Amino acid sequence: MQRFRADGFDEFVAARWSALLHVARLLTGGDRQRAEDLVQESLVKLWFAWPKVAEQAPEAYVRQVLVRLAARSARRRWWGERPVGELPDRPGPGDVSAAVAERSRLESALALLTPRQRAAVVLRYYEDLPEGQVAQALGCPVGTARSHASRGVARLREILSDSARPVK
Amino acid sequence: MDDFERELTRMMREGRAHTPFDPGRRARLYEGIRARRRTRVLVRAGGSALAVAGLSVGLAFLPHLGSGPAPADLPLPATGSTAPPRSGGPTGPASGTAEPSTSAPPTRGTGAGTPGDTPPGTTEPATTAPGSTPSGPVSPPATEPGTSGPSPGSTPTYPPPSG
């Protein structure tokens, strides 16, 4: 029964894990741990819905779940984090690069948007989804999704131009 | 799409790093699935238990809600007053003794009534004093031979109950 249910689930997760993790990271404004938690929770929900959505559009389903979970987790004040004596993830030597710096700048800028604006921008510009699918994933009308995306881009334009301004 | 939007798209896509779905993540994912499944089973079991408890409480209070006379109780006294002949062991002797009592000739010799006008069991011999020897028709009700037997010294003439 379980094997029948999970038929193809492992392959889907193995193929899409990295992309989903990156989307989740953008949706959380660069919070890697929270991104992993969101992907895990989305895939758990997908597993239970797998017999229904496996033949249709599992990626759209999990993307929609991911966006809603990200918006919900952004409203939370506490995500179950506990202080520890040592950092669990230390940056490796290869992470110190210009690409990482740019990614950090982008993630910091994304973190300043509202969750809906961030989701609209990520779905529109990273996933390259049409406005209708963005609205469907956000669960709002197309005009609202378009408004979220345009305001998010305007805010990012402002933040990134400020941070790129040379220090005198 | 202007230059900034193109740059934004590039920045988002360039920062993408390949993260393999290693066995540790797979184990963590399936542990989450098992935990969610246990939660769902518990929630369903709790819901079922609540439903059963609610039904039980409802059924327990249901008779108290309808405390008035039940419709099924009303006809019972009416049927009881007609005194239908009982069926079974104790009624056998009654019917058996009724025949001789109605067919037996009157022992009092009054000749006023024809046999069958008045039930023999309800006439005066039922109140006779002990020591008299009433005949068959004046014997105590044969429907309950065990509980109200003949008075001491009486010699009933009706046959004993059979079968």
Image: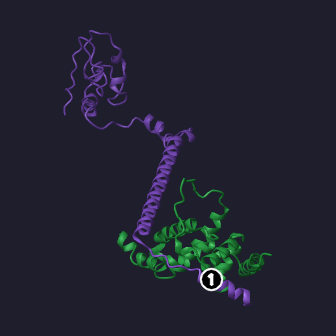
Chain colours: A green, B purple
> In the picture, residue A135 is in which quadrant?
bottom right
The mark tally for this picture is 1
As drawn, the residue found furthest toward the right would be A168
Residue A133 visible: no
B77 sits to left or right of B65: left
Is residue A92 at all visible to an observer of this figure? yes
* In-front residue for pair B19/A69: B19
Residue A142 sits above or below residue A90 on the image:
below
Does B87 sit above or below residue A20?
A: above
- For mark 1, give the secondary structure: helix
At 37% from the left and 23% from the top, the residue drawn is B122
Identify whether A116 is placed above or below B70. Answer: below
Nearest the viewer among B52 and A124 is A124
Residue B6 lies, with reference to residue B24, above or below; the image says below
Q: Residue at x 30, y 26 (%)?
A: B144
Residue B88 is situated, as x and y percent measured from the top left of the image, at: 27, 37
Which image quadrant is residue A63 in? bottom right
Image-based side of A88 in relation to A134, left or right: left
Bin the neighbour count of mark 1 within 10 Å (Cα to Cα): few under 14, some 14-19, many 20 and up.
some
Three-letter amino acid code of the residue under disc 1 = Tyr
Residue A32 at x, y = what percent? 57, 68
Residue B146 versus residue A69: which sits nearer the camera?
A69
**Which residue position is annotated with label 1?**
A126
Q: In the rendered view of the protein, which quadrant contains the N terminus of chain B?
A: bottom right
Residue sitting nearer the eye, A156 or B94: A156
Q: Residue B142 location in percent, x, y?
A: 28, 26
**Quadrant where the C terminus of chain B lies?**
top left
